[in-house]
Amino acid sequence: MLTVPSITNDLIEGKTSERATCVADLLARNHDEYAILIHGAMHSHVHHIVGNAYSLGGSEEHLKAVFDGQARTLDHWTSSTVLVSNDDDLHRRLGDKMYERAFLVYFDQRLQDFGGDWMALLQEYLLGERALLSGVVGGFAHPLILLADAIDLASPKVAVEALAMLAVDYNPLHRLLDASAKTAVKQTSALAILERIRTDDRFDNLFSTSGVGNTMAILGSEDARNAALQHFNSYIVPSEPDETNKALLELAEAAVLLLAAVDAPKTKHEFDIYLTHQLTFVWSIRVLIAALPPTATRTLFRAAWLMMVLTYITQLRPEIVKDRITQPVIAPPQTEIEWERLKSAALENIEDPHYTKVIRTLWEFATLWPHNEALFLDACVVFERDFAGWKGFDIRPEH
C-alpha cells in the first residue's frame, strides 16, 4: 500500500492564471480586512469556500461572488488593545479570545522572521519544542481545517491565520491527544468501534437533543468520560508509513457513512452538520499527513478520530446502515459525466461552504482511491439528491 501522496493543484505548483491571481487577491483582502472569528464565536469559512470553488473549476467571477457572499457575514478587524511579544507570552495567552488580533499580528511578524518560509513556520509551531499540534481539536477542530486550507491554497497568509486560530481556540481538549492512555481492547476498524459506542449504555440519558455542546456533558460525567476515552484509545493508529493510506481510507469510509448512511434513503431531509464535518476532518488530515513530517501523523489521526468519537456521541449515536447509500452501478464514462454534474451542483450552491466541501471532498477521495470510487460517488449522489438543509445544531452553533 502506497503512502499518502501530496495534493497538487495549480496554486501549489505556482502556475499563473487569472483565476490563481484572483484567489491570491481575495485571500490578501480577507487577511487584511476580516477577523478569523465571527462575533467571537463562529469561524470564518471564506478560505474554505474560495478554495473549494477554485478546485471545482469556478470562474474568476464566481470566485469573487463566493467571496463577497461570505464577506457579508464576517466581522471587520478592529485595533487590538493587547500585544503578544514573544513565544512565552503566546503560550500564556493561548485560548484567550481577546488576543485574536494580537495572535495574527504576532504570527505575521514570525513569518517575516522566517524569511517568508511559511512551511518552516508551521513546522516550528506545530511540531517544535513547544508543539501546538494537539491543539487543532479546539474550536470544533476548525484550526485543523484551516491548516489544510493553507496547504491547499499554498498561502502563507492562510497559514498565519491558521496558527492564530489554533491559538485563539486552544482548549483543554488537547490533553486527550497528549495523554498516552492504554486500553485492553484494540481495534483497527473505526466502524466496529462506532457500533460499540452506539450500543454502550453508559451514554444513555446524558442528553436528549443533539449538538456538540453535549461534549461538556460527556466529559463532565465520570462514567461517560471513561467510556468515551476507552473507545477513543481502542483505535490502533498506524505506526508504519505503508499502513497510513489504508488507515486513512478506512476513516474516510466511516466519515462517508456518517454523512449519508444514517437517515432514511430517497427522501429529502436535512443532513447533520456536525457528522458532515467528519468528512472535512479526514480530508484535512489527508492533506496535512502528506505535507508535514511523519512525526505529525499519529497526532493527526488521533485528532480526527477524537472528533469522530465525540461527535458521534453528541449527535445521539445514529445507526449506520451502509445499504442506505447503495445505488445502481454507474460505469465509465458515465462516472465522469456524473462527477461533472455533481461538481456543477456544488458551484451553484454559492452561499453554502459545507455543501460545496462535501461534494469536493468526495470527488477528491474518489480520485485518491479509484478502487473505492463507487462508495464515494454513490454517497455524493445521495447527498445531492436528498439534501434539504442542515440539522444537529447547538443553540449557539459552532461550525
Image (cartoon, rainbow, N blue to C red):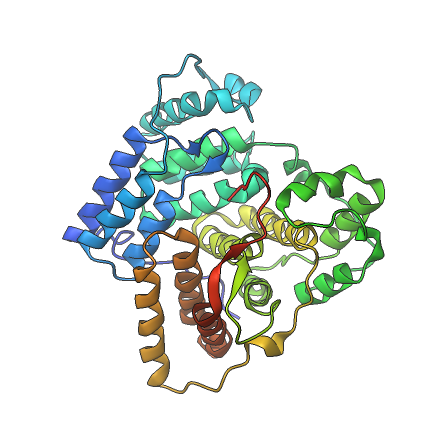
Give the answer, above or below, for where 325 lies relative to 277. below
Quarter of the image for residue 223 reads top right
Residue 243 at least partly seen: yes
Quarter of the image for residue 54 reads bottom left
Residue 16 at least partly seen: no
Residue 366 position within the rendered picture, expressed as x and y whole percent measured from the top left:
43, 71
48 left or right, relative to 26: right
Residue at 45 percent of width and 30 percent of height: 39
Residue 232 position within the rendered picture, expressed as x and y whole percent measured from the top left:
72, 52
Residue 76 position within the rendered picture, expressed as x and y whole percent measured from the top left:
33, 28
Quarter of the image for residue 172 reads top right
Count up the numbered dots.
0
192 left or right, relative to 241: right
Residue at 38 percent of width and 33 percent of height: 160
Residue reaching furthest to the left: 18
Give the answer, above or below, for where 328 lies relative to 183. below
185 left or right, relative to 257: right
Residue at 25 percent of width and 56 percent of height: 10
User: Which residue occupies the foreground of this view, 391 or 51?
Assistant: 391
20 left or right, relative to 298: left
Residue 364 position within the rendered picture, expressed as x and y whole percent measured from the top left:
40, 65
Give the answer, above or below, for where 380 lies relative to 143. below
Residue at 31 percent of width and 39 percent of height: 71
User: Which residue occupies the foreground of this view, 125 or 380?
Assistant: 380
